[in-house]
Amino acid sequence: MASPEDMAAAVADSMRQRTGHSLDEWVGIVEQGSGLDPLDQLAVRRWLRDEHGIAQNSQWAIAFEVAGRAGWTMPTPQQFADQMYVGEKEPLRPVHDTLVAAAEACGPEAHVEGRATYTPIVRARQFAAVGPGPRLTVRLGLRFREAPGGLEPAKAFAQATHWMHFGTDVDPQAAVQQARELLALAYEQNG
């Protein structure tokens, strides 16, 4: 799976054909005509959509580039996780970290990415996601083509077809014991 930077580069390469302007031209348009904080990527994307009818992938590429030129750098997966587990969610962090490490250990092609609300673990496609769940839980989302029985179907979480939840009372190693075989199966099915 391509990184966010690779995807942005691919979109940038075809920007003029799709929008009538190059990525550099769009950066100038945003900087000179929007009046927006270049670090507020959501506001920049909305402005591009509302004022110029720019499609979503192009909005992301332009906003990403505008913010980068203003000094923004993409947080690391660790930094994203730091932001997810603050305050009352802080005790959930060891479970999160242990599940992410177990997913990454499923095979040599597994790698961890960062998002604001969950941590995706990707092979050829995302096969697992870990993030805060409801009622002080850690949610493990798994993506299956053929799921084993007894799992709860996921509802709109990070490309997951099924999920599990672990509370603050669970030992991180116990969570991994429950999830290890399922992580391996999801890894296998998403290669």
Image: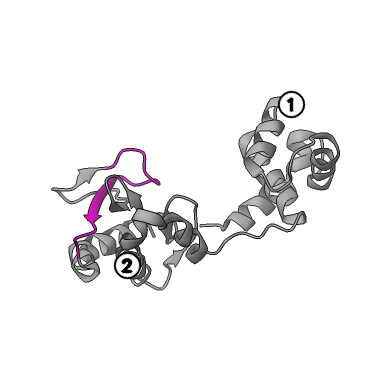
Please tell me which residue lies in front, 144 or 135: 135
Quarter assignment of residue 121 = bottom left
For the magenta stretch, what is the residue range? 154-170
Can residue 127 be seen here? no
Q: Within 10 Å of the Cα at label 2, are there few (<14), some (14-19), or many (20+) other Cα atoms?
A: some
Quarter assignment of residue 102 = bottom left
Q: Position of residue 62 (x, y in %)?
A: 72, 44
Tell me the amino acid under the disc marked 2. Pro
Relative vertical location of residue 45 with respect to residue 173 in this rendering, above or below: above
Q: Quadrant of the C terminus?
A: bottom left
Kindly identify which numbered label has been placed on residue 51. Answer: 1
Q: Within 10 Å of the Cα at label 1, are there few (<14), some (14-19), or many (20+) other Cα atoms?
A: few
**C-alpha distance separating marks 2 and 1:** 44 Å
Q: Of all residues shown, which one is farthest toward the left?
A: 150
Quarter assignment of residue 37 = top right
Q: Residue at x 55, y 57 (%)?
A: 2
